[in-house]
Image (cartoon, rainbow, N blue to C red):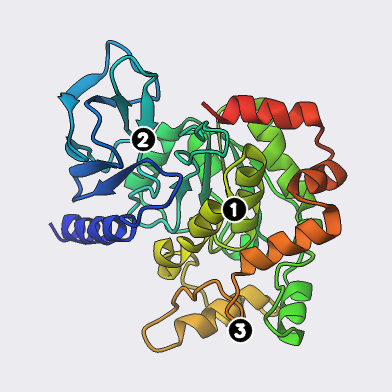
Amino acid sequence: MKRIAIMTATLLLSGALATTAIAGEPLRIERKDAQSATVVRDDTVPASFWLSRDTVLDDGDTLIVRDSKAQRVAVKLPASERSYVIVRRGNEAPQVVAERLLPLEKGSNFRDLGGYTTKDGRTVRWGKAFRSGAMPLLTDADYALLEQLRLGAVVDLRSLEEREVAPDLLDDRTGALFLSNDYSMKPLFAKMEAGSGENTYQGIEELLVPQLRAIFNRLLADDGAVVYHCSAGQDRTGIATALIYEVLGVDRETILKDYHLSTGFRRPSVEMPPVDPADYPGNPMVKYYAASQAKPGGAKAEPLYTPSGQSHLAQFFTYIDSRYGGTESYLKQKLGLSDVDLEALRTKMLS
């Protein structure tokens, strides 16, 4: 009973955080409790709603309501199942919506990239790519849910020091291909300590070239869903997500708003297992997390803004534009992607 109560409280909090509408997100799901949710839309055009275990409308799907003008439609949506709601207005092509933030018991910032509308009117497909914070404390129920995602690859953006303390297990549990690249956090910590807090992300686009190339290559391979993550799921993961959205054609205002959702979606207490710093001498991440946990109330997610009040990601976009001539140019110069690759990515990732 206690476990169910904790899970329900977590889901209600997650649902409350997920209620903020973002332009470019015409459909969204707000979780009510562990068994139910609400589909929210912007218009009142008569539409029929189906519950589905995949993103394709077929005879196996369950009709929720037919020809409804309601902007809020209740649906039975067990948190233990990865389901989709398919919405169809008259003879128009069906639209798909799912929970952006997955209702994990011990996950942090694990979300689906799908659902945003691009500048040319297409929509990012659900179930193709997922982003997350570290996952060292996932429960069996969490793994059971994630096994439903049909994962083909897990790309770990973290450093050697982070992986030493909290190695990934998701690939072992799902059979997904695991990809990472070795580097140390020590130079990054030294840079942050010496800096002003402005333009913090400059240079990360060089450091993460192998991992970013792996993400794009796996998305192009289209061999199962791809999940990529760092420790908090906000900085390195936020950069990777912004690059994907940008090349797909999502507008920057939407990208920035999505990036800042991490502050509310993070759960720092589950991003690192309990560790004794004495067991990891010289590991800067253990020292950093131990200091964070020692603060009154424990570690908290800090808003992703610079001391001058600018978005870290907005500054990064300015830097990418100035240094490389934009995101597409960066992807071509540093990751070796071609125009053919980028168009293929849009074909696979957009509907």
* Disc 3 residue crowd, few under 14, some 14–19, many 20+, Cα 10 Å: few
* Disc 2 residue crowd, few under 14, some 14–19, many 20+, Cα 10 Å: many
Image coords of residue 2 (percent x, y): 16, 61
Mark seen at residue 252: 1
Q: Secondary structure at mark 1?
A: helix
Q: Could you tell whether 41 is left or right of 132 in the image? A: left
- Residue closest to the far bottom: 296
Q: Secondary structure at mark 2?
A: strand
Residue indicated by mark 3: 307
Q: Is residue 250 visible?
A: yes
Q: Secondary structure at mark 3?
A: loop
Quadrant of residue 223 within the rendered picture: top right
- Residue closest to the far left: 1
The residue drawn where x is 31% and y is 58% is 14
* Disc 1 residue crowd, few under 14, some 14–19, many 20+, Cα 10 Å: some
Judge depth for marks 2 and 1 and give the one in front. Answer: 1
Indicate the amino acid at tag 2: Val
The residue drawn where x is 55% and y is 71% is 304
Image coords of residue 99 (percent x, y): 35, 43
The residue drawn where x is 53% and y is 64% is 232
Indicate the amino acid at tag 1: Arg
Image coords of residue 156 (percent x, y): 63, 51
Residue indicated by mark 2: 97
Image coords of residue 163 (percent x, y): 63, 60
CA distance for labels 2 and 3: 37 Å
CA distance for labels 3 and 1: 22 Å
| Among numbered discs 2 and 1, the one appearing first in the sequence | 2
Q: Is residue 207 visible?
A: no
